[in-house]
Structure formats: structure tokens, C-alpha cells
Image (cartoon, helix red, strand yellow):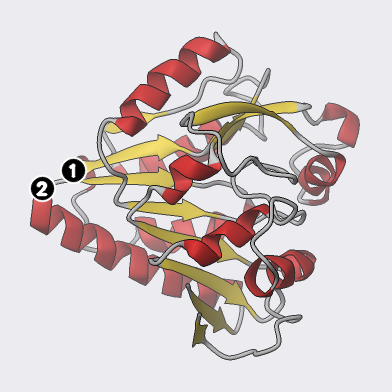
Amino acid sequence: MNVRVLADARSMGAAAAEHAAQNLRDTIQQKGNARIIAATGSSQFEFLEALTSSPGIRWDRVEMFHLDEYVGLSATHPASFRKYLRERLIEKTGILKYHLLDGDGNIQSVIQRVGYEVSAAPVDVAFVGIGENGHLAFNDPPADFENESPYLVVDLDEPCRQQQVNEGWFASIAEVPRQAISMSILQIMKSREILAIVGGERKARAIQACLEGKVVPSAPASILQTHAHTTVYLDQDSAALLSRQLSTSR
């Protein structure tokens, strides 16, 4: 696992976007298309802004999979990840092939349909974040490291739900859904390459636990330590509690 620490959120997003853009250009040149997993949340703002502005990417050759979505939230709600991806990625790039998770539809049908599609071929690169409680996608602690289903319905714990309030997506914790559809840990780990983009001081304790601690379900994103082609992009705030503040490889 490679860890890169940048000065601030904008520098972090730009560096991660440069890496991602080169991956997409190379993959499309080599095999004609690229399959990606896209994350959402405030930690992805600068990254997606830079990525969607990157030159030379044949977005019409990119197939996108949705990482997670709240159960019971409409696609027009300000916190909807479908809305987020449409506005910040799909509409900006003209991606033609994408698989969004309909959290207020027939949940089991959605899980089966999108799970079948994501399992049909390897994912070339996954863009992910890490939550304040160490979650990967919406796999809150203790995460299930063994479930082989591509997508799961998961219960959201209170720290995860409070994070959504802290970031301004909801006015109060009472408004935050209690369940979500989430890509499973094992499905994320099947990706050929993983880029984790994680900024902000509220993430520092989770970053310390997941990058320097043991690989345990209580720190879900610690599983990234076992993936040979993972790069974690941090800013100075999210990296503040790490034992080393410089770019490093593990």
C-alpha cells in the first residue's frame, strides 16, 4: 500500500486525479474500455473536479459503478449519491454506461441487477473514501470481510450517521437513513487498483487506525493494507496522527 500526503485538500485531489486520469487513459488504450467504481462525499469534491477536467480521457469508453446509496432516499434529495454522481461526474463527462443504486426502489432487485453487472468483468480502478469510523463504502465496523455478495444492505451506525450531519448533508441525525446499499468489502478488494482519497482532521484518527493498526473488522478500511495496488491520498490534516508525515510505501 502506497501512502501520499499532500499539503491540502486541493493538492490531494489534484494528485489523485492525475493518477486516476493516467490509469484511465492507459487502460482504455490497452483494452478499449475501463470499468470504475466511484465514491461520493465531501472528501471527493476536489478529486472529481480535477478528474473531470483532465484531458485525453475517452469517457464514452468508461463504465461506472456506484459504491453505495441510502435506502429510502429519493434521487432528488440533496444527500442522494445518485444526484451527486449525476451532477459531479456523469453530466460533466458524458459517461454513457453507468449503474446507479436506486435506494428507494426494489432493493433486492437493485442488488441483484447491479451486482450481476459488476461481477461480469474485473473493475480496473476503484475510487473510495474512508469514514470517520473507518468505514469503507458504507461497511461500518465491525465490517464483514467474508461476505461474497457484490452488494449488501447494511445498518449504519451512529458515528457514520453523525458524520453525514457534520458534513452538512442532513440537518439532524434523525433525518439520516438507518440503512444503505453498500458494495461489499470483498467486491471492492477485487478491483485491480484502488485509490483512496481522504482529507480533513476529522478523519485523522480513522486514518491512523486503518493505516498503522492491525487489519481488523473494527477498522474496516484497514483491509486496504492487504491490497497490492492501493494508493491512499491524504492531506496534512487527515495524516496528522500518522507516525511519518512524508509520502511512503508499505
Q: Nearer the viewer, residue 53 or 237?
A: 237
- Above or below, comparing residue 52 to residue 35 in the picture: below
Say which mark, if any, is on residue 61.
Answer: 1
Observer-side mark, 2 or 1, equals 2
Amino acid bearing label 1: Arg
- For the residues labelled 2 and 1, say whether their Cβ atoms are less than 8 Å apart: yes
Rendered image quadrant of residue 55 = bottom left
Q: Say which element carries label 1.
A: helix
- Above or below, comparing residue 171 to residue 229 in the picture: above
Local packing at callout 2 (Cα closer than 10 Å; few below 14, some 14-19, many 20+) is few
Q: CA distance from mark 2 to mark 1?
A: 7 Å
Could you tell me which residue is drawn at 27 percent across and 63 percent down?
A: 23
Residue 222 is situated, as x and y percent measured from the top left of the image, at: 62, 61
Q: Nearer the viewer, residue 88 or 117?
A: 117
- Along the horizontal axis of the image, is 218 left or right of 224? right
Residue 61 is situated, as x and y percent measured from the top left of the image, at: 18, 43
- Along the horizontal axis of the image, is 135 left or right of 55? right
Could you tell me which residue is drawn at 74 percent across and 45 percent down?
A: 142
The disc, 2 or 1, on the residue closer to the chain's N-terminal end is: 2
Could you tell me which residue is drawn at 34 percent across and 46 percent down?
A: 36
- Along the horizontal axis of the image, is 59 left or right of 150? left
Say which mark, if any, is on residue 24.
Answer: none
Mark 2, residue position: 32
Q: Nearer the viewer, residue 145 or 230?
A: 145
Residue 124 is situated, as x and y percent measured from the top left of the image, at: 29, 51
Residue 237 is situated, as x and y percent measured from the top left of the image, at: 72, 77
Q: Say which element carries label 2.
A: loop
Amino acid bearing label 2: Gly
